[in-house]
Amino acid sequence: MYHQYAKDMPIIDYHNHLSAKQIAEDKPVENITKVWLDGDHYKWRGMRANGVDEAYITGAAFRRKF
């Protein structure tokens, strides 16, 4: 079924944590890391649970590095 109907279609992620407003307004992003991590509390929780320092999750180090 994939090859017959879907192989030439775009990949659409119906479940994400991106801002619908940012998508609708076609706002540029600084880099892919900020798209992936900004505002996603599920990823933040995983990072915290694995001992990542808060500065690298939502703090100054995150903003400076990426």
Image: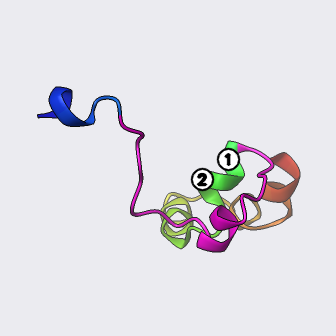
Question: How many numbered marks are there?
Answer: 2
Q: Nearer the viewer, residue 42 or 28?
A: 28
- The secondary structure that dominates the magenta segment is loop
Residue shown at 20% from the left, 35% from the top:
5
Labelled pair 2, 1 in contact (Cβ < 8 Å): yes
Asked if residue 40 lies left or right of residue 28, the reply is: left
Label 1 SS: helix
- Let me know if residue 14 is in the magenta part: yes
Q: Dot 2: few (<14), some (14–19), or many (≥20) neighbours within 10 Å?
A: few
Q: Nearer the viewer, residue 41 or 10?
A: 10
Residue shown at 48% from the left, 68% from the top:
42
Q: Which amino acid does label 1 sit on?
A: Thr
Label 2 to label 1, Cα distance in Å?
A: 5 Å
Asked if residue 36 lies left or right of residue 45, the reply is: right
Q: Circle 1 is placed at which residue position?
A: 33
Q: Dot 1: few (<14), some (14–19), or many (≥20) neighbours within 10 Å?
A: few
Label 2 SS: helix
Q: Which amino acid does label 2 sit on?
A: Trp
- Let me know if residue 43 is in the magenta part: no
The magenta stretch spans which residues? 9-31
Whole-percent x, y for residue 18 in the image: 58, 65
Residue shown at 62% from the left, 58% from the top:
37
Asked if residue 20 lies left or right of residue 29, the reply is: left
Residue shown at 59% from the left, 71% from the top:
20
Q: Nearer the viewer, residue 54 or 3?
A: 3
Whole-percent x, y for residue 49 in the image: 49, 65
Whole-percent x, y for residue 48 in the image: 56, 65
Q: Circle 2 is placed at which residue position?
A: 36
Whole-percent x, y for residue 52 in the image: 62, 57
Asked which quadrant contains residue 13, the reply is bottom left
Identify the mark at residue 44; answer none if there is no mark: none
